[in-house]
Amino acid sequence: MIELIGVRKRFGQQVVLDGVDFVVSDGETVALLGPSGTGKSVLLKHIVGLIHQDSGVVRVDGREVSKLKREDLRQLRSTIGYVFQNGALFDSLSVFENIRLGITQEDQFRDLKYCHERVERCLKLVNLSPETALKYPAQLSGGMRKRVGISRAIAGTPKYLLYDEPTSGLDPVNADIIDDLVKSLAAELGVTSVMVTHDVRGSMRVADRLALLTNGRIVLQGTPAEFKQSTLPEVREFLERDFGAITFAA
């Protein structure tokens, strides 16, 4: 379980998170929505311990992330796969070596036979051929780079998957492919997923629950149906401004 309780974070004079309460139960896929610049990615980075809160509590599996020592934090991170917004692939490394970096156990990482088998398996899970492992990022389309990034995130068999804008910059067809992958991986691997996104249509197809972060706070957490029926001004404004009132009418 992932828990954020009363989390506050500011950078200088800018308040980014202002008392955020956010819970993700085991096995859930939760989409974190919100306008650009509202702190969605900052929230994700708290979960994996890349940023520490000014106040409040961040727990993963009952452990307070900000209080973990280096080795305990390393162990926690080995259970979390992180999909970066732009893939964050290393251009000088092949796809095989990029995905291999996601293997968190040292003995497995050193076992080349295991690595080749694991990379092939991860590519298959994201619907890419084994030959893709021989390519370099510059040889891949944007959609393929996103899928390789997901392959790297699952290479270490994580319990949690954190997606930072996985469909940003993609055309609708490729965005649908990534959304379908998020859903299929949750089912096949049994992972708990948090997906930061501004794509409401995709999130309603994929997520069990949605959460809207705006003005530093989560104003609503609920099912897609509850979002469609919400009369909260912040929810209606977000849905109607970006995606049209008719599409999301109850």
Image (spheres, helix red, strand yellow):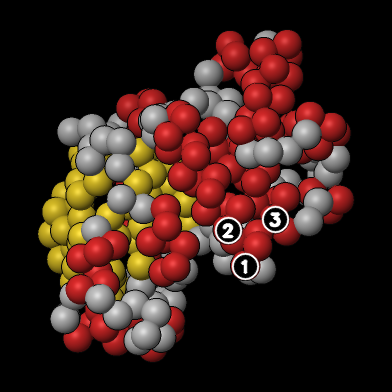
Locate residue 240, reporting x and y percent. Answer: 35, 86
Locate residue 58, reporting x and y percent. Answer: 22, 47
Secondary structure at numbered mark 1: helix
Camera-nearest residue between 96 and 189 = 189
Instruction: Look at the image and tell me whether residue 101 can be seen.
Output: no
* Left or right, residue 130 beside residue 62: right
| Kind of residue sitting beneath label 2 | Asp
Q: Tell me the crowding category of disc 3: few under 14, some 14 to 19, or many 20 or more residues within 10 angstroms, Cα based.
A: many
Disc 3 to disc 1, how far (Cα)?
11 Å
Image quadrant assignment for residue 234? bottom left
Looking at the image, residue 138 lies above or below residue 93: below
Q: Residue at x 58, y 11 (%)?
A: 107
| Kind of residue sitting beneath label 3 | Gly
Q: Quadrant of the C terminus?
A: bottom left
Q: Which residue is mark 2?
A: 176
Q: Which label sits on residue 110?
A: none
Q: Residue at x 58, y 52 (%)?
A: 178
Q: Are marks 3 and 1 in contact (CB under 8 Å)?
A: no
Q: Which residue is mark 1?
A: 172
Disc 2 to disc 1, how far (Cα)?
6 Å
Q: Which label sits on residue 143?
A: 3
